[in-house]
């Protein structure tokens, strides 16, 4: 088995006037949980359908397990898909639905029975084997859809927003179950979602997509902490963005002006003088100081941004603050509760100072 | 609210009254007639008898029944064979083409079926359009005998009933979720298995409805066999017509009608029970 189970080389797809997918290259490692993340219409489902063979690419080739399968019909690709609508066959029982793929491969009846019963046990549906899909709840239908796919022992399991139809609590449970199932089976999962939280919590790698292109491919930590573009930074999680220009660069650092103060940041991405950049800081990386706390921080005042508390949103374990800076810019800050700490009792309108630890910011060169 | 319910009552009463007078009463009269004795002077004489039914059990009538069944069956089969792919293509085409295709299916409805039958005659008769063209091109040297054959009757029936097959099939196939077909392919099913195991079972209600809508009227069709078959092939419809108009034997005509009605009621009941069990499973999924 090659290291890459699926490879897309220069693959693009157009539907009429609509370029669903620009020419992309994508490699999927054997055994990983890869998530295609993006808003609707970004091409993530198109990638899934191209891999499955339900669509044919306009350009490029698709390799599965080292073999060029570009011209293969879906029934020969040895991949299976879990559809967003589940696409369970309404006239067949749960058992028959799951056995369908095995029957297509002309596997002996005893083996089919054994394998279906085994998978029914794994997805905890043994008692419902004779029911019709219409007699099951959404979560149960979802499990049948997954069982029907994995019972064929596919090389890759393709999942097209399989959790989007479930309510919040069930979705949380299914996320855990799916992840466990993937570990247990060791099968490569390619998962499509528009929910960034789902993507971060489940995946080994995330491909963030925008308008038919892959903006960034990396571990959840990479895409969250080191986004390569403003789009990725804003799509994944909350982000405070300062738009500014590079004043000066030297060998390792850049100097920028934020809210009338000078900051020196590491020049990781080769920014040039006078280049427009966006400085991104996550809300949880912002520290908010009250008037009585800054007395002993005189040395840090150069990097403190003054503002006023505009809103306090209490969320149990955290408090979210909206701080209005003097330039009228709004910042989002998340503060964590500490048992013996009364300092989170912010008043609306209270003057505060905001800073962050040097190095926790991300410098995003402007694309233009 | 008051006026609305009054309006509703009037509507229902009128429709019920209409059906009572023009459908139920004639049917009841036929039922009674079928048990009376034929009389050359007064149409019927009021002597109760079962002769009209018993005399139907003779080989001549049986042959006519079988012929009619055969025609109805082959007509239905052909309609299904032609109509299903057509309905499938319409249901799966883009909405722009779809309305055009549907219009093409429905247009013949706006013309009298009798006129359309005459149009077919004009096409296939000895000096008709098809023969003229074939002779002109030189493919044949003598006009092909097409009119007044069994094939001509079949052609007329299929042409006449095709929309009744296509429309219910279309309505049913359109509701079929295309993802189910994709799921079947994804699970390794080839085209034939997908058709037999997924598409046909899921559109069986449409197939049943279309089959009934074609089979039942095809059983008693009488003017197409007369016009296109040259009255050589006596069918049930012609038989009934003859009994009433030519032989002036109303009770026997009525008896044949009654038997056919019973036969059709049986088929409709079968269909109704079939669809009822489906409704029940629909009902269960709601609960």
Image (spheres, grey):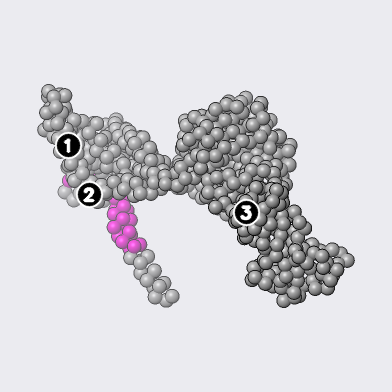
Residue A28: in magenta span: no
Q: Where is residue B124? Give x, y as percent.
A: 17, 34
Drawn side of residue A348 relative to residue B246, left or right: right
* Residue drawn at point x = 67 percent, y = 72 percent: A326
Q: In the picture, which quadrant includes the C terminus of chain B? A: bottom right
In three-dimensional space, the C-alpha distance between marks 1 and 2, rounded to whole angstroms, equals 17 Å
**Residue tagged 1:** B123
- The dot on residue B111 is 2
Closer mark to the observer between disc 1 and disc 3: 3
Q: Is residue A359 visible?
A: yes
Chain of residue at mark 2: B
In three-dimensional space, the C-alpha distance between marks 1 and 3, rounded to whole angstroms, equals 85 Å
Q: Is residue A235 visible?
A: no
Residue B39: in magenta span: yes
Q: Residues within 10 Å of mark 1 (few under 14, many from 20)?
A: some
Magenta span:
B15-40
Chain of residue at mark 3: A
Q: Is residue B110 above or below residue B66?
A: below
Chain of residue at mark 1: B
Q: Are marks 2 and 3 in contact (CB under 8 Å)?
A: no
- The dot on residue A273 is 3
């Amino acid at each position: 088995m090659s290291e890459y189970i699926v490879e897309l080389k220069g693959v693009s797809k157009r539907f009429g006037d609509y370029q669903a997918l620009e020419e992309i290259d994508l490699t999927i490692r054997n055994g990983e949980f890869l998530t295609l993340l993006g808003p609707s219409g970004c091409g993530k489902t198109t990638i899934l359908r191209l891999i499955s063979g339900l669509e044919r690419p306009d350009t490029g080739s698709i390799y599965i397990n080292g073999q060029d399968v570009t011209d293969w019909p879906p029934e020969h690709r040895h991949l299976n898909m879990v559809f967003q609508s589940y696409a369970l066959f309404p006239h067949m029982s749960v058992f028959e639905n799951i056995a369908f793929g095995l029957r297509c491969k002309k596997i002996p009846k005893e083996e089919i029975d054994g394998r279906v019963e085994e998978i029914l046990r794994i997805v905890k549906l043994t008692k419902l084997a004779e029911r019709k899909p219409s007699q099951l709840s959404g979560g149960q239908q979802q499990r049948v859809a997954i069982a029907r796919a994995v019972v064929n022992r596919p090389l890759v399991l393709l999942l097209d927003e399989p959790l989007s139809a479930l309510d919040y609590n069930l979705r949380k449970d299914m996320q855990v179950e799916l992840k466990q199932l993937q570990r247990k089976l060791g099968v490569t999962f390619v998962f499509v979602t528009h929910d960034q939280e789902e993507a971060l919590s489940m995946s080994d790698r995330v491909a963030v997509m925008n308008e038919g292109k892959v903006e960034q491919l990396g571990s959840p930590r990479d895409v969250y902490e080191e986004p390569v573009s403003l789009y990725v930074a804003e799509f994944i999680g909350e982000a405070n963005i300062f738009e500014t220009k590079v004043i000066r660069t030297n060998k390792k650092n850049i100097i920028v002006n934020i809210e009338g103060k000078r900051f020196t940041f590491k020049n990781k991405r080769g920014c040039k003088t006078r280049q427009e950049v966006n400085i991104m800081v996550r809300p949880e990386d912002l520290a908010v100081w009250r008037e009585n706390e800054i007395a002993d921080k005189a040395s840090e005042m150069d990097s403190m941004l003054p503002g006023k508390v505009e809103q306090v949103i209490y969320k149990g374990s955290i408090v979210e603050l909206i701080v209005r800076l003097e330039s009228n810019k709004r910042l989002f800050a998340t503060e964590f509760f500490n048992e013996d700490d009364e300092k989170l009792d912010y008043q609306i309108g209270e003057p505060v100072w905001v800073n962050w630890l040097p190095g926790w910011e991300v410098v995003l060169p402007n694309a233009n | 609210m008051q006026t609305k319910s009054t309006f509703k009552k009037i509507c229902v009463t009128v429709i019920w009254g209409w059906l009572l007078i023009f459908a139920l009463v004639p049917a009841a009269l036929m039922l009674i007639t079928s048990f009376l004795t034929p009389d050359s002077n007064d149409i019927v004489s009021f002597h109760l008898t079962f002769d009209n039914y018993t005399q139907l059990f003779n080989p001549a009538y049986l042959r006519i029944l079988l012929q009619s069944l055969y025609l109805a069956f082959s007509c239905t089969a052909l309609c299904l064979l032609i109509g299903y792919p057509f309905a499938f293509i319409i249901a799966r085409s883009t909405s722009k083409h779809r309305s055009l295709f549907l219009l093409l299916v429905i247009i013949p409805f706006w013309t009298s079926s009798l006129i359309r039958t005459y149009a077919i005659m004009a096409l296939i008769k000895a000096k008709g359009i098809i023969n003229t063209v074939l002779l002109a091109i030189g493919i044949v040297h003598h006009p092909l005998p097409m009119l007044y054959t069994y094939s001509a009757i079949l052609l007329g029936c299929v042409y006449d009933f095709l929309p009744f097959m296509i429309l219910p099939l279309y309505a049913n196939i359109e509701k079929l979720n295309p993802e189910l077909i994709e799921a079947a392919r994804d699970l390794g099913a080839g085209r034939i298995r997908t058709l037999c195991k997924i598409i046909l079972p899921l559109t069986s209600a449409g197939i049943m409805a279309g089959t009934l809508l074609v089979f039942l009227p095809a059983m008693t069709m009488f003017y197409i066999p007369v016009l296109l078959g040259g009255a050589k092939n006596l069918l049930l419809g012609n038989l009934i017509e003859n009994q009433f108009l030519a032989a002036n034997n109303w009770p026997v005509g009525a008896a044949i009608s009654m038997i056919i009605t019973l036969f059709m009621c049986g088929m409709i009941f079968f269909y109704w029970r079939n669809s009822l069990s489906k409704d029940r499973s629909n009902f269960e999924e709601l609960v």
